[in-house]
């Protein structure tokens, strides 16, 4: 297969972990006889420094012309901690999602038995956790109209949702639930938010088309509690943009290492794959960032193009790195292996004889 | 001291746990020579059934004329799970907070060493946790303008904040930090929300009046992770209405039992005290609800009126119940003690010879 892949390293540790993913994709090329072409482009703070824009026109064009996008991370303290900033690196990512209509962010949270002891939760609460969050990604309050009063003393954000925006991701989530444990949990604040009530109405209606799936509705504050107390009771979680942002980061925390979890953002015509973690600016250039989340997002990319054997080869190589303790220090404090070494080990263990 | 206390039991287990708090206040009356007069009033689903309104005019009047309000819990599945509901029990509580201008919700999360094993977190992550959340309670998206399109296919919520709303709670939080560990964490989403950027500007300005307090700003998704990984690093958390709703419930989950944590909601002229837990409708009438959160909110009430010795007598009696394992089954699975028994034990152990 020929795939044209855009590489958006972004800020902080983004470029470092992305470089490991490229090695893995090259290993897949060689072992399985595919051809991947890579095109690098700027996004985030690094793009702002060069062009003033967090998402330059050139980057958007490259992404639109690609089959898939591999993304690193975004954000730097120099902008994030500055209350006078007018443009924020994150706006580049939001604009990209919007322009490509990547409306569904899919975040699996699976606990690897070999690494369950990493979890801050007691074993009983974490074992068997295998859930996936479907987060709406292009609507809601992050994209709503904003306003500041002239004197700067008042500010306003708007959260808006339409039936169409809700139903297209709801169908994806119901289909996923159907192929999994057949449980769908809608997370909202329908006791206080009008948009949440719309989510409940739309999702409850769609549920009748998936009679094998059990739908359960849960308030966001309660879901944040359940994610700590009984994460293994969730199967598929469906939620809006902001609740999904919070809940999926929480999910990554309970799993033991924020450095292990991949994600995808899909629309009807485009797909982007990225680690769930942020730009971790304190670790930039230190060769200590965990490349596994980015590498597992390569596996999601391969699955997206139905290259299942290839995806499994990547996952096998990752599991081998866990078994041999070839991991970065965030996973095993005493480990002396850096980002590069772990990336090389995994890439070198990707082959077609699994 | 004479205090006129309004009793709002509300829904589910609310009235049952409140009854235990009244016993404790009566014990304080007898032991310390105070006079408390109690006036019951309806709120929530129970009020809706009687009057159609979740906050009847009569209840509001009683609250306005009281020195303090003791509140139980609100919400029932018959309304909460019904997507066609137009009025929700919770609206009664929101209206009450708004009418009395109870703009600051204060939620301590302290781990009792005797009960640390209840926590879903490994001991290392939970020990020494002693934080307090200052949640803005009368503004933000829960109270913003809402809209549904005529055809019902679109919905909208608005989040609005003013400098004044932010600064009055910020001062309370800075003062609390000054008398504690001198660390204040502002939780927001300033990378995406205009209201969050206003919070940062206002709070950063106020910080200069409290030079002994260190201010740290944290994004909400990251705070949800830190609450799981390093809860003991927080001292005072300051945040908006919705983030505070989620974060404080998360805080109660990590502490081990949602049945143990009290809260207060204060304004300039009124104060309300309530457990952090919900109405837990499945437990209603079963005499299994944990009355400790409600009883500890009595201690917060007494502290509010500078009855420090009295508050300590209540806390001592609660600690005695832990030490003697006179607790409800949510705290100790094998326990056969019910709500009433635990309430009686604590009330009977409140005296002035501590
Ligand atoms: Mg996030
Ligand atoms: Mg809540």
Image: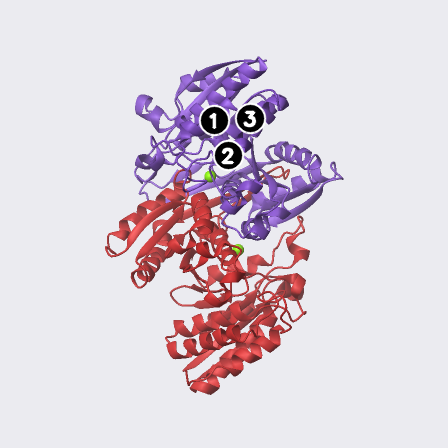
Chain colours: A purple, B red
- Can you tell which of label 2 and label 3 is closer to the viewer? 2
Contact (CB < 8 A) between labels 2 and 1?
Answer: yes
Residue A290 found in image quarter:
top left
Count neighbours of disc 1 (C-alpha within 10 A) and say few if under 14, some if 14 to 19, many if 20 or more. some
Residue B1 found in image quarter:
bottom left
- Can you tell which of label 2 and label 1 is closer to the viewer? 2
Circle on res. A324: 2
Residue plotted at (30% across, 38% down)? A84
Count neighbours of disc 2 (C-alpha within 10 A) and say few if under 14, some if 14 to 19, many if 20 or more. few
Q: Are marks 1 and 3 on the same chain?
A: yes
Up/down of A211 relative to B271, above or below? above
Contact (CB < 8 A) between labels 1 and 3?
Answer: no
Judging by the rendered image, the residue that carries numbered circle 3 is A314
Judging by the rendered image, the residue that carries numbered circle 1 is A345
Task: State which quarter of the image contains the N terminus of chain A.
Answer: top right
Task: State which quarter of the image contains the C terminus of chain A.
Answer: top right
Identity of the residue furthest to the front in this view: A324
Q: Is residue B115 visible?
A: yes
- Side of A171 relative to B172 (left or right): right
- Side of B295 relative to A308 (left or right): left
Q: Is residue B41 visible?
A: no
Note whether ligand 1 is within 8 Å of mark 1.
Answer: no
- Whichever of labels 2 and 3 marks the residue nearer the N terminus, that label is 3
Which type of secondary structure does the marked residue at label 3 adopt? helix
């Amino acid at each position: 297969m020929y795939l044209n892949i855009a590489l958006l390293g972004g800020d902080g540790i983004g470029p470092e972990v992305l470089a490991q993913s490229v090695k893995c994709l090259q290993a897949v090329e060689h072992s399985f006889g595919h051809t991947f072409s890579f095109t690098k482009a700027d996004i985030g703070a690094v793009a702002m420094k060069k062009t003033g824009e967090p998402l330059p026109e050139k980057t958007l064009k490259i992404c639109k012309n690609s089959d898939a996008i591999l993304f690193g991370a975004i954000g730097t303290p120099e902008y994030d901690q500055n209350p006078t900033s007018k443009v924020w690196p994150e706006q580049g990512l939001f604009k990209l999602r919007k322009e490509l209509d990547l409306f569904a962010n899919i975040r699996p949270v699976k606990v690897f038995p070999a690494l369950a002891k990493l979890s801050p939760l007691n074993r009983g609460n974490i074992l068997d956790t295998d859930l996936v969050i479907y987060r709406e990604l292009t609507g809601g309050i992050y994209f709503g109209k904003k306003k500041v009063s002239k004197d700067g003393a008042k500010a306003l954000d708007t959260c808006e949702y339409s039936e169409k925006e809700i139903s297209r991701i709801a169908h994806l989530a119901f289909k996923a639930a159907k192929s999994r444990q057949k449980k769908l949990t809608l997370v909202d604040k329908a006791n206080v938010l009008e948009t949440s009530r719309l989510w409940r109405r739309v999702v409850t209606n769609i549920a009748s088309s998936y009679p094998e799936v059990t739908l359960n509705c849960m308030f966001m504050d309660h879901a944040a509690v359940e994610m700590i107390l009984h994460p293994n009771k969730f199967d598929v979680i469906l939620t809006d943009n902001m609740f999904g942002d919070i809940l999926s980061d929480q999910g990554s925390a309970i799993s033991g290492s924020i450095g292990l979890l991949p994600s995808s953002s899909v629309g009807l015509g485009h797909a982007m794959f990225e680690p769930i973690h942020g730009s971790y600016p304190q670790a930039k250039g230190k060769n200590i960032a965990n490349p596994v989340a980015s590498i597992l997002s390569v596996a999601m990319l391969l699955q997206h193009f139905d290259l299942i054997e290839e995806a499994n080869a990547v996952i096998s190589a990752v599991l081998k790195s866990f078994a041999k303790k070839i991991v970065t220090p965030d996973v095993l404090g005493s480990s002396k292996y850096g980002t590069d070494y772990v990336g090389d080990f995994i890439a070198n263990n990707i082959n077609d004889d699994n």
